Amino acid sequence: MIKKINIAIAEDHDLMRQGMIALLKEEEGINILFDVGNGRLLLDKLNVSQPDIILLDIAMPEMDGKEAMEIICKLYPKIKVIIISTHYNDTHISEMIMKGASGFLPKACDIEKVVDAIYSVYDTGFYFDNKVSKSLVQKLQSTHNINSFISDNSLSEREVSILKLICQEKSNQEISDLVFLSKRTVEWHKNNILAKTKSKNIVGLVKYAIRHKIIPDTEDLY
């Protein structure tokens, strides 16, 4: 059984926060460790338990997301932060990414995008959609720091386990049942594996798996 991703949610609007909690609870690979309504309560909770990822709003009372994230990055560098905000513009995006955020999403996005961002940040360390990528390039192109935000193409442990099952000719539904993830999430991982390995199809994935010793070459079995 693959370890669930522990997340925390910091959002001051109760309706928004509770709605997000209800939808994310449907995702088998995600566990909501706790939720709070401001940055100060978030830091108090982190003294007791640390999630893998925090979904963090910017505009909150008592302590906003900017101040909270700066403290989190210093005290808890292993925790990844995904900003979810109505302030979805180039200025805020580049500022928060430069300060240490691993992703930035608009509050108006659907829950599937939030889930994809969580898995991407957990597996690769970041999630940049087209708008975020454009904002970063514009901000970084003059400083030559773009490479510091680009992850390598190595597969994560989760992706390797899914690749092995793909090579065993398991269907997306069968993989979903075996690794305790939704079928849609398995499909997302599959597409991510294809992109990382630069493979066009399942045959390409099998060749990649053999070449990188993820599965044995059939000739080695005889």
Image (cartoon, rainbow, N blue to C red):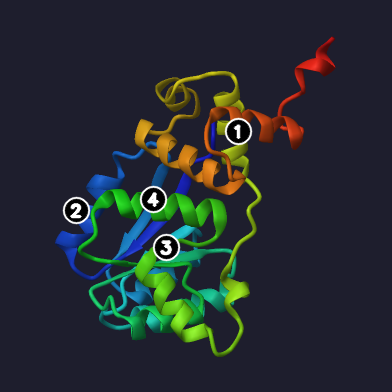
Q: Eyeballing the image, is 118 above or below 174? A: below
Are the residues at dot 1 and dot 3 in contact (C-beta closer than 8 Å)? no
Please tell me how crowded label 2 is: few (under 14), some (14-19), or many (20+) other residues with Cα within 10 Å. few
Residue beneath label 2, please?
A: 19
Q: Earlier in the sequence, mark 4 or mark 3?
A: 3
Residue beneath label 4, please?
A: 116
SS at mark 4 in the image: helix
Identify the residue at the far bottom of this view. Answer: 142
Question: Looking at the rendered structure, which numbered label has been put on residue 184?
Answer: none
What's the amino acid at mark 3?
Ile
Task: Name the quadrant of the N terminus.
Answer: top right
What's the amino acid at mark 1?
Leu
Q: Eyeballing the image, is 18 above or below 138? A: above
Q: What separation in Å lies between label 2 and label 4 (alpha carbons)? A: 17 Å
What's the amino acid at mark 4?
Asp
Q: Nearer the viewer, mark 4 or mark 1?
A: 1
Question: Looking at the rendered structure, which numbered label has been put on residue 54?
Answer: 3
Q: What separation in Å lies between label 2 and label 1 (alpha carbons)? A: 38 Å
